[in-house]
Amino acid sequence: MPANNNHRSMIIIMIVAALLVTACQKQQDTHQVEHPATITKIDGSDLHRVALTKKAIQRLDIKTTSIQQAEASDMQIAATDFDATHTASTAPTMVVASGVTQSRKVVPYAAVLYDPYGKTWVYTSPEPGVFVREQINVDFIKGDKAFLTKGPSIDTQVVEVGVAELYGAEFKIGH
């Protein structure tokens, strides 16, 4: 009888040992993690290319629109709306000739990004799911439109919803 108990004890110890060894082995993860954003530095610049997955675009609700062209008469340009940051003494002064019409690129004001240094940017979309920040110069803002003196060409796709999220992805803010 004692030999039989030794035999049972030995079998139980072997089973427990086998279970412990199996539990401690590193399990190979076959699940691939898909990163929502891929950031690639653009050669010769400080800019990056932000490529988002389709799911990331849906989750961020990214919306684009095309840059438009508008004709602004001298009266429209000279009579730009003042906002809370301008007073009569700090407002930009514009000298225009009467009857002059100037062409301006127009983007939704929501598309304009101000960086920590005060530079203004938009995110262009050169191809579906890809976004690149491009510097702009804002001439004036009227309502929900920003009129540009410098920026991407007419009909270029720019992001109007999801701009801050793209900036965060580009600079890994909040990751």
Image: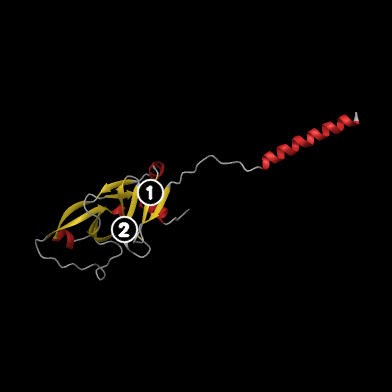
Residue 117: image quadrant is bottom left
- Give the class, few, some or many, for how many residues have Cα within 10 Å of label 2's Cα (few <14, many ≥20): many
Residue 70 vs residue 88, the one in the foreground: 70
Give the residue at mark 2. Answer: 121
Residue 64 vs residue 134, the one in the foreground: 134
Residue displayed at 63% across by 43% down: 26
Judged by depth in the image, the label closer to the viewer, 1 or 2, is: 1
Determine whether the residue tagged by mark 2 lies in a helix, strand or loop. strand
Numbered circle sitting on residue 152: none
Report the side of 70 relative to 122 (left or right): left
Report the side of 8 relative to 75 (left or right): right
Residue displayed at 43% across by 46% down: 36
Amino acid tagged 2: Trp
Relative to 109, residue 29 above or below: above
x and y percentages locating residue 24 in the rendered image: 67, 43
Quadrant (top left/top right/bottom left/bottom right) for the N terminus: top right
- Give the class, few, some or many, for how many residues have Cα within 10 Å of label 1's Cα (few <14, many ≥20): many
Give the residue at mark 1. Answer: 51
Residue 51 vs residue 6, the one in the foreground: 6
Real-space CA distance between mark 1 and mark 2, rounded to the nearest whole angstrom: 18 Å
